[in-house]
Amino acid sequence: MKKYSSLHLFHAVATFCLILTGLLLYSQNFRGTLADLRIYLRYSHIISGGVFAITSAAYIRLITMNWQRCAHQNNRKIMNLVFIALATGVFLTGALLLFKVDLEMTTGISTLNWHKGLAALGVTAVLYHVQAGFWQSASNPEKLGNADEGLQTNRRIFIRWAAAVGALLGGGATFNWLLGGAGKNVPQGTTKRFKDCNKMTPQPVPGLGSLPPAGGGYKGEFEVFTVTEIPCVNSDSWQFRLFGLVDNPFMLTWKQFLEIPRKVQISNFYCITGWTVYDVTYEGIPLERLFGTVGVKPQARYVKFYSSDGLYTSALSLKQARMEDVMLAVLMDGKPIPSDLGGPVRLIMPQMYGYKGVKWVSAVELISEPYIGYWESRGYENDAWVTDKQS
Ligand SMILES: Nc1nc2c(c(=O)[nH]1)N[C@H]1C(S)=C(S)[C@@H](COP(=O)(O)O)O[C@H]1N2
Ligand SMILES: [Mo]
């Protein structure tokens, strides 16, 4: 029994650390400038996960050894099975995340969302377990008189039911969220549009062919895709950095960025999920033009793009990035690109699928080795050529 209670304590502490670090990671507060902290948080979470796996394994052994003894307690048995299933699920999806295996291709739900969903169910189960234990210990110490006991039992039954209903609601919300994407402000693809939250002054002045748009205005509908909340920026704090394997790396303010000559082009926008927008008139800075000013070092072979959302990245080979229609766009159909579609500056790579078109581009780095971006590391092709370009 002694062994049992100290194991219970260890397990509780490991579970608590795991939940705490998990919630902090989930809170999205550790992005951008706090990104370094996030790395340590992630390590702590992984280590807690390892400890949790060990204490869980010890626990499961104890439970199975005592399985016969609690033969009469069906509730307990069910709860134990639920715990075992959730702990196993959380651990396995955590391990898959650690080794960068994505389930999206096979299950339609990313490993991260499975992990978060199962964890949320796990937390619900833990809360239920904790409250059950609380009421049990609260009613045990003093033996109450008969009348009181009846009352006590009624109350306990009521609370049990309330907790069960609460847990069910929690679980339902979890599944709803699991199947519906990552969260309320995080569209994984929606035709709903969002209010432009960027505050950029001065506004870029459209050049010839940009307004009125030479393409006659785009045809179709953009779906807003983002794996984070939509970042909002203003021209005072906005910066653009070009660095890495170049002779003269630079950092530009919005005003300086607007001084670089832009060009106008008409192109289609293809998302790999099946939607296309035709004849978009983009005005932006060809990447090749930027490369010309910084002196690309001979070791540079790839180009990595960063987003001010602090999470999304993608990359092109230097050769691809130098294609004449690859640009950092600031205007679309003669108007500033709104924040939900990646403004103030987004990458346009018309000959590849949209996931290459990093939104809210904040920095470009020249590197020597291939880099695998956000969706690419989740199973999408690194070379995202659109093959059937009918228009
Ligand atoms: N920063 C960032 N850029 C991104 C994405 C994202 O989630 N975050 N999604 C990509 C995907 S999958 C597509 S299809 C396009 C969608 O562009 P839109 O939201 O302007 O329609 O943006 C790409 N660039
Ligand atoms: Mo996409």
Image (cartoon, helix red, strand yellow):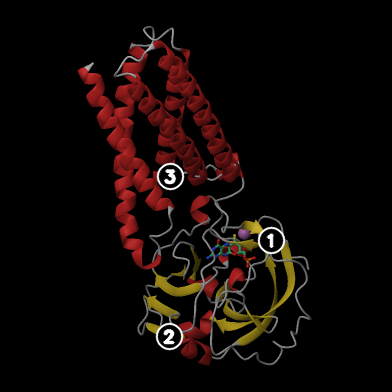
- On the picture, is 296 further left or further right than 214? left
Dot 1 and dot 3 residues touching (CB under 8 Å): no
Q: Residue at x 59, y 79 (%)?
A: 329
Mark number, residue 252? 2
Lower sequence index among marks 1 and 3: 3
Q: Is mark 1 within 8 Å of ligand 2?
A: no
According to the image, label 3 marks what residue? 97
Q: Residue at x 47, y 41 (%)?
A: 115
Lower sequence index among marks 3 and 2: 3
Element carrying mark 3? helix
Rounded to the nearest angstrom, the CA distance separating label 1 from label 2 is 36 Å
Mark number, residue 387? 1
Quadrant placement of the N terminus: top left
Dot 1 and dot 2 residues touching (CB under 8 Å): no
Lower sequence index among marks 1 and 2: 2
Quadrant placement of the C terminus: bottom right
Task: Please tell me which residue lies in front, 205 or 302.
Answer: 205
Residue 42 % position (x, y)? 34, 50
85 shown above or below 207? above
Q: Is mark 2 within 8 Å of ligand 1?
A: no
Q: Amino acid at mark 3?
A: Leu
Residue 305 % position (x, y)? 47, 69
Mark 3: few/some/many CA within 10 Å (<14, 14-19, 20+): some
